Amino acid sequence: MLATDNMFDITPTESSRLSQIDFDNIPFGRVFSDHMFSMEYRDGKWHKGEIVPFQNLSMNPASSVIHYGQSIFEGMKAFRHENGKVSLFRPEKNIERFNISAQRMCMPEVDPQTFMEALDQLIGMDADWVPNDPSGALYVRPFMFATDEYIGVKPSETYKFMIFTCPVGKYYSGAVKVKIETRFARSAAGGTGYAKAAGNYAGALYPAKLAQEEGYQQLIWTDAKEHKYIEESGTMNVMFKTGNTLITAPVSETILDGITRDSVLTLAKSWGYEVQERPIPFTEILDLAKEGKLDEAFGVGTAATIAPIAVIGYEGVDFELKDHNTWEFGTRVSKAMDGIKRGTEEDKFNWNHFV
């Protein structure tokens, strides 16, 4: 039965799959909730969106996205609080970044109010899919892709904006081993590095595969021009702590403006840490590691929140860091971020958006 409210058409599923899910054993990104949101852009405007049962898509083989890569996405999480309520963490920042990505990829922006209402209604319908486990969350994936049925290099005139969700557990089970990458480049000045464009991630797969064959789980990317300065770690921003100082690369046209990154820096400043956002020669980090002064190194992102780095490799030499279980800042910020998201710590920055 099709229900209509002021903004979207809604078709609830007739048979929920929720009872089939083992929430104690959820593979990351492979189990999907009951519903999804969809909205089409054509004739120069967005048309009424709909929430329907999760299902496969039907596409013309000539669909523009397949051939020319006009595709962007976001990633955010919904969390269950102790009182049973469900909240999203800073979704307005994801919406803002989504539209920045749309501009760069020559795609139409989505009205922020419509975007937020779609999130609220979709997650509200599938609120039972938000895990109760304190290490679990509901991962939310908004995305947009070109749909013109045309073989020609030009911006599409039609698009589909969609959101689906999936319950997830931990992204990493422990600390990771990373390699400093000085041959391949993730992004270059003037490119799309600051956008969450699908092609950015496709181009990173081969270098990551080579690193994995050497025993590393992730890369630390360096700048494309000189391969001298640290940029990101895999799919995350990367941070280093020495003494009372937290160091990270500045946001730029080659580095994604991470929401988790901003949140961690905000907390660090509020706790009295010195925060340095500046170009970081990778040799500086290796020197700190050699001297035993690199207290902590970690990736920050939506999927893992805080991903501690155990080993940094460069040209066949591995530099081991201190046991992350003894870390001061990483442990504190991970606990604080998790507590804010789940309502066990004060949300003094008003980061939670309740659905």
Image: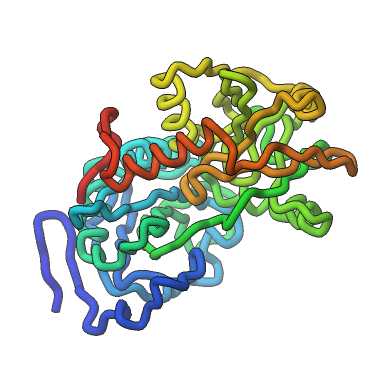
Residue 184 is situated, as x and y percent measured from the top left of the image, at 79, 42
Residue 121 is situated, as x and y percent measured from the top left of the image, at 20, 57
Residue placed at 47% from the left, 55% from the top?
Answer: 146
Depth check, front residue: 281 or 60: 281
User: Which residue in the rendered view is the most extreme toward the right?
Assistant: 316
Lateral position of residue 59 relative to residue 292, left or right: left
Q: How many numbered marks, from 0 up?
A: 0
Residue placed at 30% from the left, 48% from the top?
Answer: 342
Lateral position of residue 8 relative to residue 184, left or right: left
Specify the quadrant that holds the N terminus: bottom left
User: Which residue in the rendered view is the most extreme toward the front?
Assistant: 326
* Residue 292 visible somewhere in the drawing: yes
Lateral position of residue 267 relative to residue 207, left or right: left
Q: Is residue 54 above or below residue 287?
A: below
Q: Is residue 122 above or below residue 298?
A: below
Q: How is the image coloured?
A: rainbow
* Quadrant in which residue 110 is drawn: top left
* Quadrant in which residue 210 is drawn: bottom right
Depth check, front residue: 30 or 49: 30
* Residue 228 visible somewhere in the drawing: no
Residue placed at 39% from the left, 64% from the top?
Answer: 167
Residue 132 is situated, as x and y percent measured from the top left of the image, at 31, 62
Q: Is residue 203 above or below residue 251?
A: below
Lateral position of residue 118 relative to residue 203, left or right: left
Residue placed at 48% from the left, 44% from the top?
Answer: 305
Depth check, front residue: 286 or 202: 286
Residue 200 is situated, as x and y percent measured from the top left of the image, at 62, 46
* Quadrant in which residue 130 is drawn: bottom left
